Amino acid sequence: STSNPPTMPASRLCVGHSDSLYDRIYNLVVQTERYLDLSSLSPWDGRFLAAMRNAVTFLHHTGRAIQIRIIFGNPRANFTCLGVADDLLRDVNTSATSLRVSVGSWLSARGLTHLDPSWNHAKIVAVDGRVVLQGGHNMYTYDYLTTSPVLDASMVIGGPAAVHA
């Protein structure tokens, strides 16, 4: 979807076989009133990043005070949390926003425990404890939106299950 102020409808841009996935994510994120929790193996790229950035820009234009918490696993350490925040907030006037964005990553260290390293691998979009998209989709354009996409399943749930997600 395009990034328009709340008074203008977004234009649908989904034209590929799996593009509805990032459109679904966009439509969930823009529903946020107070809290948005996002979790993924690593940062979004390509069209997923554009959809997430457009949704956050939309939230900025609402003027709502929203806490956005983002956690990534960090198996390859090919990103910085500040870089993720900068990419996400590229189109937001950060000196005049009510959004509070926190980005973190976590990877256990070999040698600190008897276990092999581990990292967050959850894929969650949780909106206000009301609705959650959860499943197996990493938000990678090449893997999911090109000629031979990875087949994963994700689902949207609401009610008591969403409260505890």
Image (cartoon, helix red, strand yellow):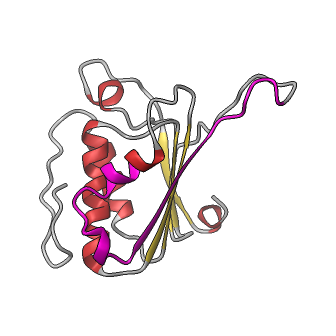
In the rendered structure, the answer to whether residue 99 lies left or right of residue 163 reads left
* Observer-nearest of 139 and 116: 116
Q: Position of residue 71 (x, y in %)?
A: 55, 49
On the image, the x and y values in percent for residue 55 come to 29, 60
Q: Position of residue 41 (x, y in %)?
A: 52, 36
Quarter of the picture holding the C terminus: bottom right
Q: Residue at x 38, y 62 (%)?
A: 29
Residue 145 appears in which quarter of the rendering? top left
Residue 89 within the segment the image draws in magenta: yes
Q: Residue at x 27, y 50 (%)?
A: 51
Q: Disc count in the image?
A: 0
Q: Quadrant of the N terminus?
A: bottom left
Whether residue 1 is situated above or below residue 142 in the rendered picture: below
Q: Which one is in front, 57 or 9?
A: 57
The magenta region covers 84-112
Please name the residue shown 33% across and 66% down the image: 30
For this orientation, the residue located farthest to the top is: 148
Residue 12: give x, y in percent of width and height: 15, 54
Say if 48 sits above or below 156 in the image.
above
